[in-house]
Image: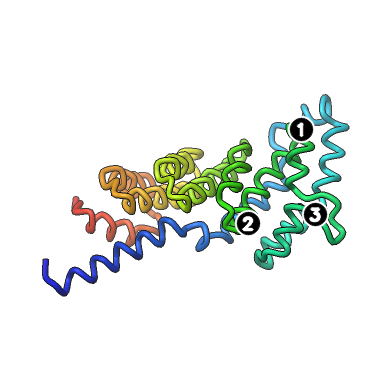
Amino acid sequence: MTDKQAPVIVEEKNEMLDKAVGFWAKYSKVIVYVGSAFILLTGGFISYKYLVLAPKEEKSADAIFPAEHLFDKMTQTGFNKDTINLVLNGGNGIAIGVVKVAANYSGTDAGNRANFIAGACYLHNKEFQKAIKYLSEFSTTATQVQTVAYSMLGDAFAELNKNEEAFANYKKASDVNKKDEFMTSEALYKAASFAESIGKSKEAIELYKENLESYPKTSRLADIEKHLARLGDFK
């Protein structure tokens, strides 16, 4: 290696690390757009909702509506701390924020959505431990949204330098729905980039190759080939 090559390699590695650890900030619009779509989904809860939980579901839906509506607006106009605080804690015409909805209506569809929204808001606020708390309590059969939830969990763990937990969640994100070409390809790329950034070269190569083999039309093709070359894999 020449002296001229060394700064280039260091710069590339730093750039790669920034992409891996700060991925949530760069792609926050993708996160919130997909997340807000979940607001309109009821999934497999419909029968249970009306036969068993109807009164509680109705109250929780009424309770979350103002904060949820404001969150939906934020996905279109951008996040800021004042608005995030209203969504989380209420105020200024919003009687109850999603934090209380999650606590008071646990087990309801609205309570579950509140966990997702709270997690997304805390992530944008860089309150990563709180983001982990709420996102860990969220689950859905809507695979695109679950992919995003795992990805956000990975982001929160990564920002806290909990690399093993971060990598595990990035991998979960890539495993949710292999038929979803765009979401899964992005999740695989993210998991591979993070693996590379923390020195898991073998795992990174495997994930990059899985991306190429499973999704040959991925928009990440050039980037993946660049990463593989950097890792010494020219096959």
> Quick one: which residue is furthest to the bottom in this view?
4
Q: Give the amino acid type for the residue marked by disc 3 in the picture.
A: Gly
Q: Is residue 178 visible?
A: no
Which quadrant of the rendered structure holds the N terminus? bottom left
In this figure, which colouring scheme has been used for the structure? rainbow
Q: For marks 3 and 2, give the one nearer the viewer.
A: 3
- x, y percentage for residue 185? 43, 50
Q: Which residue is mark 1?
A: 46
Give the amino acid at mark 2: Tyr
Label 3 SS? loop
Mark 3, other Cα within 10 Å: few <14 / some 14–19 / many ≥20: some
The secondary element bearing badge 2 is classed as helix
Label 3: which residue?
90
Q: Residues within 10 Å of mark 1 (few under 14, many from 20)?
A: few
Q: Residues within 10 Å of mark 2 (few under 14, many from 20)?
A: some
Q: Nearer the viewer, mark 1 or mark 3?
A: 3
Check if mark 3's residue and mark 2's residue have beta carbons within 8 Å: no
Q: Which mark is residue 33?
A: 2
Q: Nearer the viewer, residue 132 or 216?
A: 132
Which residue corresponds to the image point at 80% horizontal and 47% vertical from the top-left? Answer: 64
Q: Residue 199 bears which disc, if any?
A: none
Q: Is residue 153 above or below residue 6?
A: above
Q: Image quarter for residue 133?
A: top right
Mark 2–mark 1 contact, CB under 8 Å?
no
Instruction: Give the image quarter of residue 90.
Output: bottom right
Q: Answer left or right for 6 relative to 151.
A: left
